Amino acid sequence: QVQLVESGGGLVQAGGSLRLSCAASGNIFRISDMGWYRRAPGKQRELVAMIRSGGSTTYADSVKGRFTISDSRDAAKNTVYLQMNSLKPEDTADYYCNVMDTVGSTYWGRGTQVTVSS
């Protein structure tokens, strides 16, 4: 099992920045991909960004150039970060940390709310 603890959401004005963090503990030796999804009100959940164990990244087109995903991995804890700059009202959503391990299991955080005011 993997436990995920998210932090960093909040309220920010358009053009501002936030940094989300997600700390993974437990059976972290199996973790391969770490990333962030979001669900905006009335919309389906979508991938925001993903980082793989080798360092390659994937971003949604809507956040390219504004968001940066990074990670920190050691024997005790794996952490994934999402630096969000130039935030827009349309970035308002609940953001969920997602972790996948090498045997195909997926884990989700409880979510952190991001609200961008215009």
Image: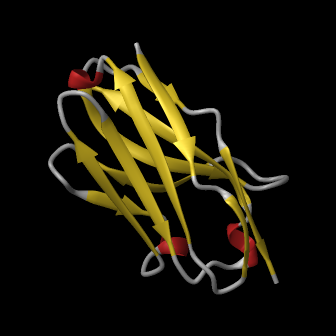
x, y percentage for residue 27? 30, 17
Location of the C terminus (image quadrant): bottom right
Question: Is residue 86 placed above or below 3 in the rendered structure?
Answer: below
- Please identify the quarter of the rendering in which residue 103 is found: top left
Number of numbered discs: 0
Location of the N terminus (image quadrant): top left
Q: How is the image coloured?
A: secondary structure
Tell me if 38 is positioned left or right of 5 in this view: right
Tell me if 24 is positioned left or right of 88 in this view: left
- Please identify the quarter of the rendering in which residue 87 is found: bottom right
> Between residues 43 and 96, which one lies in front from this camera angle?
96
x, y percentage for residue 15? 64, 86
x, y percentage for residue 98? 47, 38
Residue at 54 percent of width and 30 percent of height: 108
Residue that protrudes farthest toward the top in the picture: 1
Question: Is residue 71 placed above or below 65 in the rendered structure?
Answer: above
x, y percentage for residue 80? 38, 48
Tell me if 113 is positioned left or right of 33 in this view: right
Question: Is residue 60 placed above or below 94 in the rendered structure?
Answer: below
- Please identify the quarter of the rendering in which residue 68 is found: bottom left
Residue at 63 percent of width and 51 percent of height: 38
Residue that protrudes farthest toward the left in the picture: 54
Residue that protrudes farthest toward the front in the picture: 76
Residue at 29 percent of width and 59 percent of height: 57
